[in-house]
Image (tube, grey):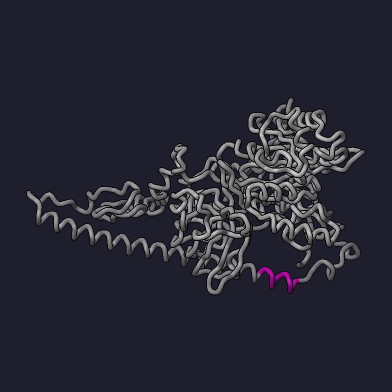
Amino acid sequence: MSRHRNFRNLDEDDYYDDDYYDDDEYYDEDEYYIEQQREQERKKKEEAERKAKENKLKQQQKLQQQKLKQQQMDDAKKKSAGGKGGGGISVASAPKSSGGGISLGKPPPGFTVESKNTDTATKSNNAQNMPLPQLPLNILASLRSNSTTGDVIRSHLSMVILGHVDAGKSTLTGRLLLSLNHVSQRLLQKYQKAATSIGKSSFALAWFTDEDDSERERGVTIDIGTKFAKTEKFDFTILDAPGHKDFIPNMISGTASADCGLLVVAATTGEFEAGFARGGDSSYSGGQTREHIVLSRGLGVTQFVVAVNKLDAAEPSWSKERFEHIKSMVLDFLIQNGFKEARITFVPVSGLTGVNISNSDKVEDEEGWKALKKWYKGPSLLEALDGFSPAKRGYEKPLRAIVTDVSPEGKNVNVRGRVVQGFIQSGDNVAVLPVGDDATVVRVERGKAAQEGSSPYSFASPSSTTSSSTSNEALLDGIALAGDTVELTLANIDSARVMSGCVICHPHPSLRPKVEQRFEARISVMERLAVPMIRGSQVLLHMHSIDVPAVLSKLLLSEKRGENPRQNPRVLTGGVTATVEITLSERLVIEESNECKALGRFVLRRGGDTIAVGLIDKVLA
């Protein structure tokens, strides 16, 4: 990339000082003009593709209107011939569609019958406003039902596992899967033998989630591990997030897909203090427990179960005083960051021995169980998880599905991701943004928990569901709803055009999200900000599974508790909330946060540190 002078702050003498600058160092004109030419050609190509798609859509609409007009004229002739007094229905007076099914004499949703007296602007607006696709009535009725007889579709929650490194998150998740019979004792024995051979015998349970060889050798979670579990009340997608500071971007990707969280806090002396320390403290470096809480709240998680783990290794073991001390400190910090106390549950557990994971389990540490029950009368971990509130889903909103993984399969493309609103089913025509290519969905598989002895890591096909599944789970064969983790097979699209971070939506222009480069947002700046933020500050913006360079192009407003708001501030310091304009390095699929949470929440980082979390208020063209 060629480099160019910045003339803004140069005096005229500096500009003409031959000794001050070396033109050979600063200029590579051939490379510069070649880059400019390539950029212009790329923009022309994109514009031509966009116009071609618009023309194709207009032609399809015009043909459809002509067919409907001819059909209505034929119907009118038949009715006038068979009716009395010439009571046929004319084309101009044909009733408008209500947005439901297509009936004779009515145009389908999104199209109007063209007449001589129809205003051109009215025709254009009607063609652009296409009603939303509707869920089948039997599925919608099941979703809205409050029946306790098993005749409803089970609630689905995505739960992220958070906490400081070495808090025991993966071990606790493995114990949870074992308690729910989603993995077998035989597989555990296999992992115990293999872990012992490399000197990590206590990590065997963690291997249920840490499947990568490098993760098992290092004993550290690196990437998000996705598992599926079924409790008495919910179907869970479990997202095991890394706790190490170096892998915060992966943690952000998982938390952005979560409805609720399981925060794992180590109770052993020194470990809790390290994980909960403030950045800059003399005793410890900044702990990830605090950062995970702040990030999760900014990314939309509103309810937590806090598992106080390793209480069997505290001094003294199963100490009520230690539990209450940790609870008071963590609860205060959660409330300070906007969590409601009614949506937070604290549970003492031991992931390694299985104490208080489930009341029905046979635990290895019987003495520890007895010691805990002397003073603890609350729920087990599984009971606490069933105490979550069901998530509100936008089933009737326009389709938004975020792609997290892509793999080609013959002429088709397999994608994994999450439906964040709306629904998708086999046979649907969809658009993939931001590239704008159309595709056809030929297969839809929802993530389901597996039976004991089978793999809980893959997507279950309809034929592999358990016999205990409710009968109307068959309603969802070939269909995925908002909140589901899915695997889709797309046809009629090049695999090179689909990548992680793409958004799958309805192909009609009125039902697509915006693809823009600028937006106005409200941000909350971290308390301990090393370098203040000014206009022109360069940051890295993280949103769901992508990260792109960005610039704070305008500072519009700043507020701090106890102080008056400041218009057009020159600098943003730690602890303020501000309204800013952000310009991205490339066009992304973004929406206002009140329209789509997943496409309207983001995190700003700089130099490996989180500096702000934010919400998009307005997308700018």
Q: Is residue 254 above or below residue 532?
A: below
**In the image, what residue occupies the spot 28% across and 63% down?**
67
Residue 308 at x, y percent in the picture: 76, 37
Predominant secondary structure, magenta span: helix
Q: Is residue 491 above or below residue 596?
A: below
**In the image, what residue occupies the spot 81% across and 60% down?**
217
Furthest-top residue in this view: 562
Residue 367 at x, y percent in the picture: 79, 37
Residue 324, visible in the rendered structure: yes
- Figure label count: 0
Per the image, is 31 magenta? yes
**Image quadrant of residue 299?**
top right
Q: Is residue 412 above or below residue 578?
A: below
Q: Which residues are magenta?
A: 29-36
Residue 198 appears left or right of 34: right
Per the image, is 528 magenta? no
Residue 340 at x, y percent in the picture: 65, 30
- The front one of 389 and 581 is 389
Residue 325 appears left or right of 125: right
Residue 610, visible in the rendered structure: no
- The front one of 347 and 303 is 347
Residue 183 at x, y percent in the picture: 65, 54
